[in-house]
């Protein structure tokens, strides 16, 4: 395993220094574009088909979540942060509650830690399935009808959403975590439903691989496209599958364990190319790994309470007078961190400042480095391989 | 042609048609055929911005499959009949939505999916959010939920089909009753179907939408003064982090917060830490503390900023190190851009939201908010429900 090395582009390249006689064209990409994964805009400066410079423009979904959190109490924040990374809401809830638990110094019971781990891994599978479906759409009909991969992936994603619905009552935006543990316990037959859903998904992973990874056109369009230098990725704060695809073996589940990850071994998938192909390989490997973890844990869930904090009856019940913490976990897209400064609101019931560190924001900051030199058609592939969720980029 | 009180009308042609035997029957049949065709081929233009957009995708995908109602999803407004607004619409997005709506050919309908599109949901009172799209678009069907299930969206499409059918038959389609919750809090802007709505708002919104050409140039970035150097080979941590911090002017290490580093030494500290293996710039968090005054209005503690930085080592046993820098308000802080390329966007974000100036930053512009937004929203003295004309 070696860290990927690539030439570093200058993101602030001055266009007037580009061969003066060249006729540059500006192409506006987004914010309403089916391939922008939400509302994201880029200005591409083109020399013919070749991208000379890319200027991303964010904020079309800036909803002011951090300001809102300053007005709400600790108890009220959980359902709000669900909506940040709306493809993996479970991770958002867990990340925020982990930060509050760290501030309060609360121990989460073992059963709740197991449940959180299972939920997190199921959510990772759902998220990667959604990524695979939309990435195939981005690549277009070339790969045996891009829409069929999309439909296959959503079919399996629904199985996971059903499992969550059984426990929490919601398809997504669950609001199932609380300070000190979980709100909803699993139902008696749930483990069995999980195992049958996993069996279905497992039997279909080879199918995905055969229509994507073993497809010549998929290979041609992703191999060698958007090579991200490992050292640059670190400087940019890129984490998760993108970092691991650049040859950096780093995963918070293994390297700074939380939940029940200290009780189970996580085999971290990584690849060496640093390109769109490597990122796809890593995500598909993670899909298998998550499946293995869930299967190993779902039968081993220990008995006991699911919440280690006194029952919450009032919205202003949790009071934290002072303190600043940063806590992080590995979401589907990388390190999802929360920085909380306590001591806001009437009677210290709200955070003074709450900052969410979204992995996708950092992933997008690689675009000005990745795009120059590629064709316009590759821009969509590179963007898709970064798997950004605009809800958490803009917050 | 007269519209009567019961809202049905007769066209003068009808009298003529009734005099020719069989003609009304034939045209009636053709009309029925056209209506049948129209209601069962309502093509959708998805204005999917956020979470509801994912539920919209699920509706279009395998299990629910909205295609079987003849509603094909099209990526362009030119080929669609229905705009499904799924997700939060912000003041930066609203002119685009308005413009895309204007690009759709008549006849067209609008479906508001989810509480964000209906009323702004819990973001309604916040500075960047439009409190309901019917403050600038005429909405035909509301589908409440956060997010609405795919089945709810299907039901919404069925209601829209019914409405279209009634309209084609010249019957008065009852106005969609708004979900009760949205009635409780009215936004500052009147709804578009409100008789008392001020026409100047319409004009302002239209002007704003027309200004969005879609390719207006972003401001050109200035040239950076320092180019990021190639990073040195990682040095393993030799353990004595505390000595390093003390050498950089840290006097005490508080138990519940990161240590405070003097402004002048902080960039140097970042360079040293990077040499010791903290190669990942995790996050930059700026906070604003307003001044404290006594009863007479004298300033006890002046207004100041705190900026916290976090770095991490990678691999097994990953370590995190954080420090804070505190300085009074008009001052700035040295950017970490030359040390960590990621400081570029992260510091820009904090500048955008809090207003901290980073000296030596190559490209200090707004990143999230519209470039002409006034003020820095995450400062304590900025009202969280600040209006933003003409959208909220
Ligand atoms: S209504 Fe709820 S699910 Fe829909 S966009 Fe708004 S926050 Fe997201």
Image (spheres, coloured by chain):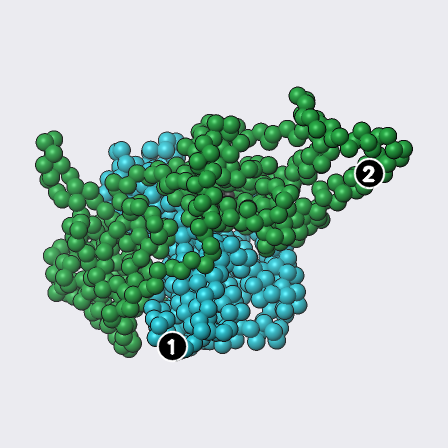
Q: Where is residue B256 in the image (x, y as percent from the top left)?
A: 22, 49
Q: Position of residue A84 (x, y in %)?
A: 43, 49
Give residue A307's quadrant in the image. top left
Residue B333 visible in the displayed image:
yes
**B308 or A256, nearer to the observer:** B308
How crowded is the residue under tag 1: few (<14 C-alpha within 10 Å), some, or many (20+)? few
- Which chain has been coloured cyan in this picture? A
How crowded is the residue under tag 2: few (<14 C-alpha within 10 Å), some, or many (20+)? few
Which chain is mark 1 on?
A: A
Q: Position of residue A142 (x, y in %)?
A: 63, 69
Which label number is shown at residue B27?
2
Mark 1, residue position: A20
**B137 or B57, nearer to the observer:** B137
Q: Horizontal placement of A35 versus B105: left or right?
A: left
| Residue under the point 53% across and 62% down | A287
Give residue B345's quadrant in the image. bottom left
Q: Horizontal placement of B46 versus B131: left or right?
A: right
| Residue under the point 35% across and 60% down | B219
Q: What element carries label 1?
A: loop
């Amino acid at each position: 395993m070696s860290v990927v090395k690539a030439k570093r582009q200058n993101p602030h390249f001055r266009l007037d220094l580009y061969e003066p006689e060249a006729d540059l064209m500006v192409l506006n990409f987004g914010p309403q574009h089916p391939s922008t994964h939400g509302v994201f805009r880029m200005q591409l400066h083109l020399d013919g088909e070749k991208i000379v410079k890319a200027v991303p423009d964010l904020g079309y979904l800036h909803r002011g979540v951090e300001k809102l959190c300053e007005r709400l109490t600790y108890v009220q924040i959980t359902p709000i942060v669900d909506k940040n990374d709306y493809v993996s809401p479970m991770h958002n809830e867990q990340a925020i509650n982990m930060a509050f638990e760290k501030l309060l110094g609360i121990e989460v019971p073992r059963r709740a830690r197991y449940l959180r781990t299972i939920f997190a891994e199921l959510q990772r599978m759902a998220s990667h399935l959604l990524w695979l479906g939309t990435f195939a759409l981005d690549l277009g009909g070339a790969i045996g009808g891009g829409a069929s991969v999309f439909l296959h992936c959503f079919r399996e994603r629904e199985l996971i959403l059903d499992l969550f619905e059984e426990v929490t009552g919601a398809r997504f935006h669950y609001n199932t975590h609380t300070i000190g543990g979980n709100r909803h316990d699993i139902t008696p037959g749930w483990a069995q439903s999980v195992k049958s859903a996993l069996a279905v998904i497992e039997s279909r992973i080879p199918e995905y691989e055969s229509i994507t990874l073993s497809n010549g056109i998929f290979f041609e369009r992703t191999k060698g496209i958007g090579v991200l230098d490992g050292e640059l990725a670190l400087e940019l704060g890129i984490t998760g599958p993108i970092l691991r695809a650049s040859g950096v073996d780093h995963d918070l589940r293994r390297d700074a364990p939380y939940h029940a990850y200290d009780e189970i071994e996580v085999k971290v998938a990584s690849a060496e190319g640093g390109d769109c192909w490597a990122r796809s390989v890593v995500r598909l490997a993670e899909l298998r790994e998550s499946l293995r973890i869930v299967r190993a844990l779902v039968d081993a869930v220990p008995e006991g309470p699911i919440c280690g904090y006194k029952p919450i009856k009032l919205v202003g019940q949790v009071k934290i007078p002072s303190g600043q913490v940063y806590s992080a976990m590995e979401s589907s897209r990388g390190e999802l961190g929360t920085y909380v400064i306590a001591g806001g609101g009437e009677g210290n019931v709200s955070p003074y400042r709450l900052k969410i560190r979204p992995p996708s924001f950092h992933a997008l900051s690689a675009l000005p480095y990745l795009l120059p030199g590629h064709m316009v058609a590759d821009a969509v592939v590179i963007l898709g391989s970064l798997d950004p969720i605009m809800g958490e980029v803009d917050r | 042609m007269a519209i009567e009180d019961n809202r049905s009308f007769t066209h003068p042609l009808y009298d003529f048609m009734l005099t020719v035997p069989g003609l009304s029957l034939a045209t009636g049949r053709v009309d029925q055929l056209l209506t049948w065709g129209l209601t069962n081929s309502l093509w959708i233009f998805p204005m999917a911005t956020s979470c509801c957009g994912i539920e919209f995708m699920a509706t279009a995908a395998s299990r629910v499959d909205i295609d079987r109602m003849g509603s094909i999803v099209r990526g362009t407004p030119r080929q669609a009949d229905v705009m499904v607004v799924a997700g939060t619409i912000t003041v930066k997005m609203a002119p685009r939505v308005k413009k895309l709506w204007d690009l759709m050919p008549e006849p067209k309908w609008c479906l508001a999916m989810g509480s964000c599109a209906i009323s702004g949901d819990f973001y309604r009172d916040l500075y960047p959010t439009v409190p309901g799209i019917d403050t600038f678009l005429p909405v035909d069907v509301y589908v409440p939920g956060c997010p609405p299930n795919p089945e709810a969206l299907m039901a919404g499409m069925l209601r829209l089909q019914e409405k279209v059918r009634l309209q084609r038959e010249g019957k008065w389609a009852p106005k969609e009753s708004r979900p009760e919750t949205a009635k409780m809090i009215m936004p500052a802007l009147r709804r578009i179907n409100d008789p008392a709505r001020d026409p100047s708002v319409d004009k302002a919104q239209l002007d704003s939408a027309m200004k969005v050409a879609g390719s207006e140039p972003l401001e050109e970035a200035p040239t950076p003064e320092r180019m990021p150097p190639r990073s040195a080979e990682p040095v393993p941590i030799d353990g004595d982090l505390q000595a390093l911090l003390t050498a950089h002017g840290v006097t005490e290490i508080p138990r519940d917060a990161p240590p405070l580093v003097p402004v002048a030494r902080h960039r140097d500290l970042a360079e040293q830490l990077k040499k010791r293996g903290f190669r990942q710039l995790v996050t930059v968090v700026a906070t604003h503390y307003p001044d404290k005054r006594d009863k007479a209005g004298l300033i006890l503690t002046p207004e100041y900023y705190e900026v916290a930085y976090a770095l991490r080592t990678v691999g097994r046993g990953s370590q995190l190190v954080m420090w804070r820098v505190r300085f009074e308000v008009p001052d700035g802080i040295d950017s970490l851009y030359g040390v960590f390329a990621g400081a570029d966007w992260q510091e820009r974000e904090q500048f955008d939201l809090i207003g901290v100036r980073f000296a030596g930053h190559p490209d200090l512009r707004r990143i999230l908010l519209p470039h002409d937004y006034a003020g820095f929203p995450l400062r304590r003295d900025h009202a969280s429900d600040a209006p933003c004309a003409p959208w909220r």
